[in-house]
Image (cartoon, helix red, strand yellow):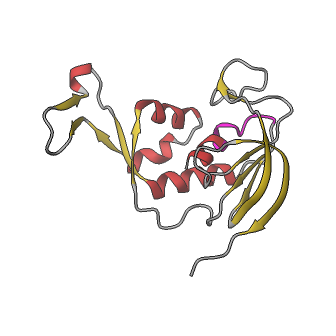
Amino acid sequence: MVGASLAAGLIDSSHTIELIDKNPLPPQKDHRLIALTKSSCDFFKSISIWENLLPFATAIKTVHVSQRGHFGSTRLSAKEIGASELGFVIPAEHINRVLYEKISQAKNITLKPNTTISNMSLRDLAISPSSHPSTSPSSGLSTSPSSRLSISPSSPGVYGGTREVKRVTPAKTRA
């Protein structure tokens, strides 16, 4: 979901993007509920998918944070900060569906489902909200002008540009 969100944010950029996942795309049977902060909702608005997610969204009005067996707790309330909500909860299956509908139509994004990367070299890739010449107008994300961006959501914490991919192979399908 993070990789697909980043790819969707870079649709208007001049970069070629490959979204690589060892599983089918979009992810199948994702029964998680995703709590989105206001900034995540704002990002989805900036890439023009929020209206498609809103029918499945449930507002978060209050949050209670505590740890069983320990002293103290915290309660957060949208009303106390003058907001209508703190965020929203949306089933992951709907977020995935809407993201993949958007990125599957992009000319600069290639989806590579059921694929693993067994060996690759990384080089630095700057991705930051800035006014860099390659900034995507809809998301504010930017990348270095000569980069080829490969995003692998199955590799936690590893996102980078590829200089060389030695071998990309289809992943074994699960029964």
What is the tally of numbered marks visible in this picture? Answer: 0
| Range of magenta residues | 7-14
Farthest-out residue, bottom: 175
Residue 88 included in the magenta stretch of the image: no
- Against 28, residue 55 (above or below) is above
Residue 12 included in the magenta stretch of the image: yes
Task: Name the spot of residue 53 as percent of width and height, x first.
Answer: 46, 47
Q: Quadrant of residue 27?
A: bottom right
Q: Is residue 53 left or right of residue 162?
A: left
Q: Is residue 81 left or right of residue 57?
A: left
- Against 128, residue 152 (above or below) is below
Task: Name the spot of residue 153 as percent of width and height, x first.
Answer: 61, 51
Residue at the image point whose x is 13% and y is 44% from the top: 69
Residue at the image point whose x is 72% and y is 26% from the top: 135
Of residues 165 and 1, the one nearer the viewer is 165
Of residues 113 and 42, the one nearer the viewer is 113
Q: Is residue 101 left or right of residue 143?
A: left
Residue at the image point whose x is 71% and y is 64% from the top: 115
Q: Quadrant of the C terminus?
A: bottom right
Q: Quadrant of residue 59?
A: top left
- Against 82, residue 152 (above or below) is below
Task: Name the spot of residue 29 as percent of width and height, x first.
Answer: 47, 67
Of residues 84 and 169, the one nearer the viewer is 169
- Against 76, residue 130 (above or below) is above
Task: Name the spot of residue 150 as percent of width and height, x first.
Answer: 74, 47
Q: Is residue 20 left or right of residue 119?
A: left
Farthest-out residue, top: 131
Q: What secondary structure is the magenta-colored segment mainly?
A: loop
